[in-house]
Structures are given as C-alpha cells and as structure tokens.
Image (tube, helix red, strand yellow):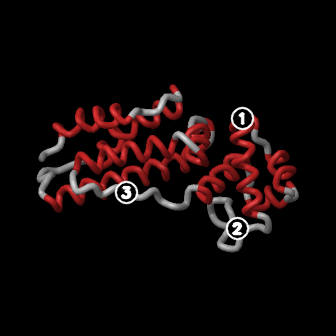
Amino acid sequence: MSATGGPTARGPRGEAAIHAAVLDLLAAEGYAGLTIEGVARRSGVNKTTLYRWWPSKPALVAATFRHAVARDLPVPDTGTLRGDLVALVRSKTAFLGEGPGRLAADVLAHTGADPELARLAGEVLGQHSAHVAEVTGRARARGEVTGPVDDRLLADLLLGPIWLRAVVTHRPLSAADAEALVDALLPGLDG
C-alpha cells in the first residue's frame, strides 16, 4: 500500500469497477450519501478489500479522483496572453461543469471536514497554478509580460470565481464572463 493509503502500482483486483462505482454513487447520491458498503455492493468487491486499500471514505474518494482525473487538461496556446487566459478559464469552467470535474467540485466542497480531501484540493489547485504559470511563462517568452507575476495569486484570482460558482452557486461562468474576468486582471500584469 502507498503512503497515501491508496493502491500501489499494482492496485486491488477490480480497481476500475471500484472507481466507476464511486463516481456512479457520487453522481446519484452525492458525497454525503456515499458509503463504503454501497461502493462494495455496486463494484462487486468485498468491503474488506476496500478498507485494505483505502482506510476511509475520503481516502477512497480522493484515490478515485486521482485515478479519474489523472490526465491533465491541455493548457491552451493561442499565441497571446489574453487568448490563453480566456481559453484556460473556459476550459476549467467546462471541466468543473460536467463528468468527474462536476463531481470533484461537489466533493471538494467538503474539504474543511477531512484532511485527505484538503490534500486533494491542494493537488487540484496546484495543478491549476501550474497551468497559469505555463501560460505566463510563454507570455514572458513572447515579451507580453516583462515584470514579475505571482502565478499562484493570478491562478487564485482567475480560478476563484470558477470554483465559487462550481461549488457554491452552481452557475458556470459564461464565455462573456470569462473574457470580462481576464480583462479585469490584465491591467495588473506588466505588459
């Protein structure tokens, strides 16, 4: 077993069925309604096997999202800082509006209650910050940005409204909202 309580490279038998069961149950019942017993029934895997690999519901859910969302979203490269940031905001909005991304937003609303979910949220937000850093790095190479940029703060400012709407209001940013958000932040960047 790995240090995070999840499967090692080998993983349990039926791992794909387990993760599919978690996603199905989250979609049907939400995080509060998800149980290890329900996952065992839905996946056809013994409950003791689940507990052997994941000691808690949050550990199982976090492992499922690491598995389901393991592939990175592509970082847009439109050729301009504004275009890249608008495309990034739209991509993140779309991701959090459907499939595993929508479910992740619902689960991450519970991060205050569990350290494992808080770690998962940190990983997700770190990935978002890395995407912003890639965009600003390309803009710097093109000469669009010449001064210092705090990529983590920029990521927070760009992605905060997306997460707020995905988790709290359940109202995605429109295409016009994405452009307005980026246009409000661009004057703060040296360009």
Q: Could you tell me which residue is drawn at 62 percent across and 59 percent down?
A: 67
Q: Amino acid at mark 1?
A: Ala
Which residue is denoted by mark 3 in the rendering? Answer: 75
Q: Amino acid at mark 2?
A: Met
Secondary structure under tag 2 reads: loop
The answer to whether marks 2 and 3 mark residues whose Cβ atoms lie closer than 8 Å is: no
Q: Earlier in the sequence, mark 3 or mark 1?
A: 1
Task: In the displayed orientation, state which residue is furthest to the bottom.
Answer: 10
Secondary structure under tag 3 reads: loop
Q: CA distance from mark 3 to mark 1?
A: 33 Å
Q: Amino acid at mark 3?
A: Val
Q: Quadrant of residue 17?
A: bottom right
Mark linked to residue 81? none
Q: Earlier in the sequence, mark 1 or mark 2?
A: 2
Q: Could you tell me which residue is drawn at 51 percent across and 26 percent down?
A: 169
Q: Could you tell me which residue is drawn at 21 percent across and 49 percent down?
A: 149
Task: Count neighbours of disc 2 (C-alpha within 10 A) and say few if under 14, some if 14 to 19, many if 20 or more.
Answer: some
**Residue 74 percent coordinates (x, y):** 41, 58
Is 114 placed above or below 40 here? above
Q: 58 or 16, which is in the foreground?
A: 16
Q: Quadrant of residue 19?
A: bottom right
The answer to whether marks 1 and 2 mark residues whose Cβ atoms lie closer than 8 Å is: no
Which residue is denoted by mark 2 in the rendering? Answer: 1
Which residue is denoted by mark 1 in the rendering? Answer: 32
Task: In the displayed orientation, state which residue is furthest to the top.
Answer: 169
Q: Quadrant of residue 20?
A: bottom right
Q: Could you tell me which residue is drawn at 72 percent across and 62 percent down?
A: 16
Is 31 placed above or below 127 here? above
**Residue 28 percent coordinates (x, y):** 73, 38
**Residue 178 percent coordinates (x, y):** 34, 36
Secondary structure under tag 1 reads: helix
